[in-house]
Image (cartoon, grey):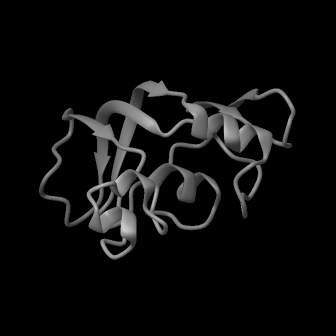
């Protein structure tokens, strides 16, 4: 797959070829058709977010087609069009979550940022 990669804070992104990873159990792989870039991505490029592991691929609002599924996946079939949101999980306990403003959660789990930063492979 092709990806625009940030190798150092403040530098221009570079177009790189990346390997297509096979999904693990319970995972899907999505062929990206569109990827939004928002202010959070600019924070990534500017180095404003803590604990980022470079290189990183900015962009986390994704629409695409499921092109591979791992074992145990029953809700996503090959060829299904899916969207991947910025926030994949919230804590449900902080003041923001309790007031219906989950987008401001103190402890969100973002599939794209955490995976691309090398913090986890969800």
Above-or-below relation of 101 to 80: below
**Residue at position x 71%, y 31% in the image:** 16
Q: Nearer the viewer, residue 73 or 33?
A: 33
In which quadrant will I find the N terminus?
A: top right
Number of numbered discs overlaid on the protein picture: 0
Q: Nearer the viewer, residue 106 or 38?
A: 106
**Residue at position x 21%, y 32% in the image:** 79
Q: Position of residue 83 (x, y in %)?
A: 29, 37
**Residue at position x 75%, y 49% in the image:** 48
Res 84 → quadrant: top left
Q: Nearer the viewer, residue 77 or 117?
A: 117
In which quadrant will I find the C terminus?
A: bottom left
Q: Is residue 41 left or right of residue 78?
A: right
Q: Position of residue 93 (x, y in %)?
A: 33, 76
Which residue is most to the bottom? 93
Q: Position of residue 59 (x, y in %)?
A: 55, 35
Q: Position of residue 37 (x, y in %)?
A: 54, 28
Q: Nearer the viewer, residue 120 or 31?
A: 120
**Residue at position x 54%, y 30% in the image:** 38
Q: Is residue 8 left or right of residue 27?
A: right
Above-or-below relation of 56 to 81: below
Q: Is residue 89 left or right of residue 35?
A: left
Res 120 → quadrant: bottom right
Above-or-below relation of 65 to 89: above
Above-or-below relation of 71 to 85: below
């Amino acid at each position: 797959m092709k990806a625009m990669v940030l190798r150092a804070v403040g530098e221009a992104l570079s177009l790189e070829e990346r390997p297509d990873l096979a999904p693990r159990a319970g995972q899907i792989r999505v062929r990206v058709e569109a990827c939004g870039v928002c202010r959070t991505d600019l924070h990534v490029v500017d180095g404003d977010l803590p604990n980022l592991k470079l290189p990183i691929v900015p962009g986390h609002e994704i629409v695409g087609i499921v092109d591979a599924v791992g074992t145990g996946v029953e809700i996503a079939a090959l060829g299904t069009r899916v969207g991947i949101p910025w926030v994949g999980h919230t804590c449900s306990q902080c003041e923001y979550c309790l007031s219906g403003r989950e987008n401001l959660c103190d402890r969100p789990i973002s599939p794209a940022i955490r995976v691309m930063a090398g913090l986890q492979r969800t």
